[in-house]
Structure formats: C-alpha cells, structure tokens
Image: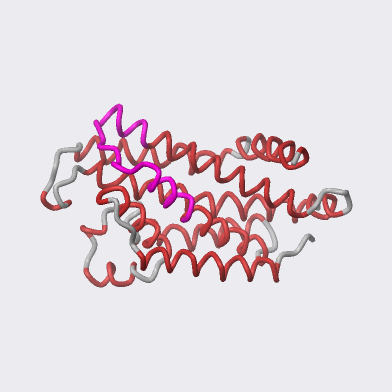
Amino acid sequence: MNALRKMTWVEFKLALREPVATFFTLVFPVLILFLFGSIYGNEPSEFLGGRGNVDNSVPGYIAMVIATTGMMSLPIGLATYRELGVLRRYRATPLRPQTLLGARVIVHTIISVIGSAVLITAGVLVYDMVLPANIPAVVLAFLLGNVGFLAVGFLLASVLPNANTATAVGMALLYPMLFLSGAGLPREILPDNLVKFGNFLPLTHVVDLLKDVWYSNTWNMTAIAVIVGMTLVAGVLSVRTFRWE
C-alpha cells in the first residue's frame, strides 16, 4: 500500500507536467463550455427538452473528459514509458506490475474528477446550471464510464508501439466520437443518419448514461450493458497483449 501511494504521487506529478494531456482534459472542455455558453446562454429551450444549453451539455463534456483521459493521456503515457525503456527498468525492480498499473488508474481517475469538478463549478457559478438531484448516482455512473475508457486506454497502450502512434490512433478514434456521441455537440442538431451511426459508439452510451441519471435519476440499462461489455473485453485483451518493452 505504501508503494502504491508513493507511485501514485509520482505519477500524478508527472501527468500534470504533460502539457498536451493537461490542456485537453482540464482546460479544453471548459473553453468549449464558455464558447457555447456565451453564444447560446442557458435559457430553457423546447429544442433541448426544456433544458438550457449548458444544462444539456455539461454531462456530455464530462464524458469528453473521461474519454480524453482514457484514450489519450493513459495510452500516450504508457507508450512513452515503453519507448523510453522506463517499463523495462520498472520490470527489473521489485515493483510489482499491479502497483504501476494501479497507480495509473488512480491518477487518471483523479484527473478526470478534477476536470469534471472544474466543469461543474464553472457551469454553476457562471450559468446557474442545475445540479442533479441524485449526486451519488451521477458519481457512480461517472466511475463506470471512467473504468470503461481506462480499460480501452490500457488496450491501446498494450498494442501501440510508441507515443507518436498512440497519439495518432487516439486522436483518430476519439475526435469522431466527440462530435457524434453528444459529448462535444448536442445530438439533437445531427442528421438522423449520423445519430444512428453514433448509437454504435461507446462514448454515446457514456453520455446517455450520465444524462439519464443527471436529468431523471434513471439508469439506462442498455448503456450499462455496453460499458460493462466494453470494460470486460478491453480488460481481457489488454492483459493478454500488454508488453513491457
């Protein structure tokens, strides 16, 4: 436990020193919030089911933070470690693999929590955003989506050889999902064919899960099934394919 605590602290400080990852997880979602908030405000709209633009968007932005952490920060960091030989050196020490990987899970979860907390705080203070009635349920939904995308991140880190490849693949997978899942833009404005295509994206189900719990305190069982299945498949494959060098 002491080793895990120390490793987590070291990994947390190193993660915050990565400017690209820090920007896209902690700063970029807030900039998007302020951009669209300044354009559309947060007045209730029938087009958005009686919700304001900020009220409708923040759960999606939280899903954006989860996905960015899982598909960019985590695989790029581990791929960099492998490329520089850090993982090989760790393997030669008494440090157990579970300690390093556990520290990574904790660190990226903390970063996602910080990014989400900043979004919620900005939404409440600047746009008088309505908070969910059942906050513990939202936290549970957040953790479920977070674990799912961290599992995907570990899978990407297992099969991608270096940081450049991890960056390219992560961006190629992530950015279409941001635009088609409701994480970056409301799905209400998308054409029907793109909405149907977005139904097959895992991030869509994280957005749906968060929004259903946030707005109506109901659990979307389809979304839960997809996220749990994604977590199990990605987790098993990453264990089988993970390479230390």
Q: Nearer the viewer, residue 140 or 19?
A: 140
Q: Does the magenta stretch include residue 143?
A: yes
The quadrant in which the N terminus is found is top right
* Left or right placement of residue 134 versus residue 79 in this view: left
Q: Nearer the viewer, residue 160 or 219?
A: 219
Residue at position x 62%, y 53% from top?
76
Q: Bounds of the magenta span?
A: 120-144
Residue at position x 43%, y 57% from top?
175
Q: Nearer the viewer, residue 79 or 142?
A: 142
Q: Does residue 155 sit above or below 67 in this rendering? A: below
* Left or right placement of residue 227 versus residue 44 in this view: right
Q: Does the magenta stretch include residue 165?
A: no
Q: Does residue 59 sit above or below 128 in this rendering? A: below
The location of residue 165, given as percent across then percent down, is 62, 61
Q: Does residue 23 sit above or below 70 in this rendering? A: above
The location of residue 120, given as percent across then percent down, is 36, 36
Colour convention of the picture = secondary structure
Which image quadrant is residue 133 in? Answer: top left
Q: Residue furthest left?
A: 46
